[in-house]
Image: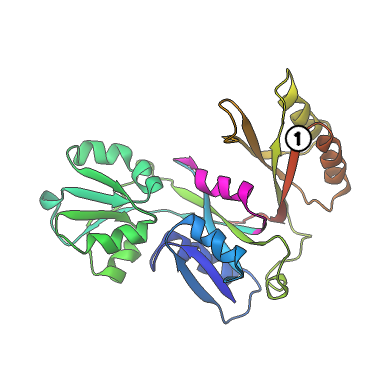
Amino acid sequence: MIIGVLGLKGSYSEKAAKQWIKKSECPEKTILEYCADVQDVFSLLESSSCDIGVVPLENSIEGSVGITLDMFLEHDIHIIGETIVTIEHCLLSRGKKEDIRVILSHPQGLGQCRQFLKEHFPEAELRTTGSTSHAAKLATEFEEMAAIASPETASVYGLDIVLQSIQDRTHNHTRFAIITRSVIPENVKTCIKDQDVSCKTSIIVYLDRDRPGALYTILGEFARNNINLTRIESRPSKKVLGDYVFYIDFEGNISDAIIKDAIYNIESDVGMLKMLGSYPRFQF
């Protein structure tokens, strides 16, 4: 089984993949395919070059990963699971703190350490990379470069940990989605746990036309059926300014009668409803 993950060795996505594999019923023999960016993970899935993808979905400090949400809309994928990784950012470099002039990381990594960077490196040039592990690899080139990445990444690329736990909030977690193709491959089906456990369902809704109470109508359907929404977020539809699609997560399985009824009633009031999947909720 081939699993596509964001970044190089030592990335948080790699950690998420290994964490999920340990808890799942996947075959022991799995190969991790490292991808330069989120788009590449989806491309590998689409071309059948990998069986499963692991992509960051949202962070407790910086919120959702926009590119992942956009890829959900643009590609035919199925979410089969989720896992949550504790994030500990460190400043890694070959040089000393006073030598650092350039700091690299994934945009989420830079955002999660925004206040730290402002206080300690106000003059440093900040550069974005496709992943925190890619930033670590680039930081090996010059002593004046540093990367924001996990402490495990330091040993992978021969960097020193200049400063530890530099994120702006003590509690920092990222939720990762475990995805596959819309038609689930046979070897992936063995990884899917019993759906009788506590589940979550994810959908995308596009209203198609703006009218008073349009969103309220959708939310009201969930409320009337006592379905708990765990997340709702809007993203630009990329059609015209002010036009949005909504990403909604809620408790329950699409096989539940009450969920089926709610989805049926919602579909008639929206321009598009895309089902991303029902999957076991992550349990700490």
Say left or right for 9 vs 13. Answer: left
Numbered disc 1: secondary structure: loop
Query: In the current view of this chain or complex, which residue is farthest to the left?
Result: 98
Which segment did they paint magenta?
62-80
Query: In the current view of this chain or complex, which residue is farthest to the top?
Result: 212
The amino acid at mark 1 is: Gly
Q: Quadrant of residue 168?
A: top left
Residue 167, position in %: x, y? 34, 45
Residue 189, position in %: x, y? 72, 71
Q: Which residue is mark 1?
A: 271
Q: Is residue 212 above or below residue 237?
A: above
Q: Quadrant of residue 52?
A: bottom right
For residue 65, say whether it is visible.
no
> As rendered, which of 28 and 169 lies closer to the eye?
28
Q: Is residue 275 above or below residue 206?
A: below
For residue 268, say whether it is visible.
yes
Q: Measuring 23% from the left and 59% from the top, which residue is drawn there?
A: 139
> As rendered, which of 209 and 136 lies closer to the eye?
209
- Does the magenta segment cover residue 63? yes
Q: Quadrant of residue 48?
A: bottom right
Residue 236, position in %: x, y? 57, 34
Say left or right for 83 vs 92. Answer: right
- Does the magenta segment cover residue 11? no
* Quadrant placement of the N terminus: bottom right
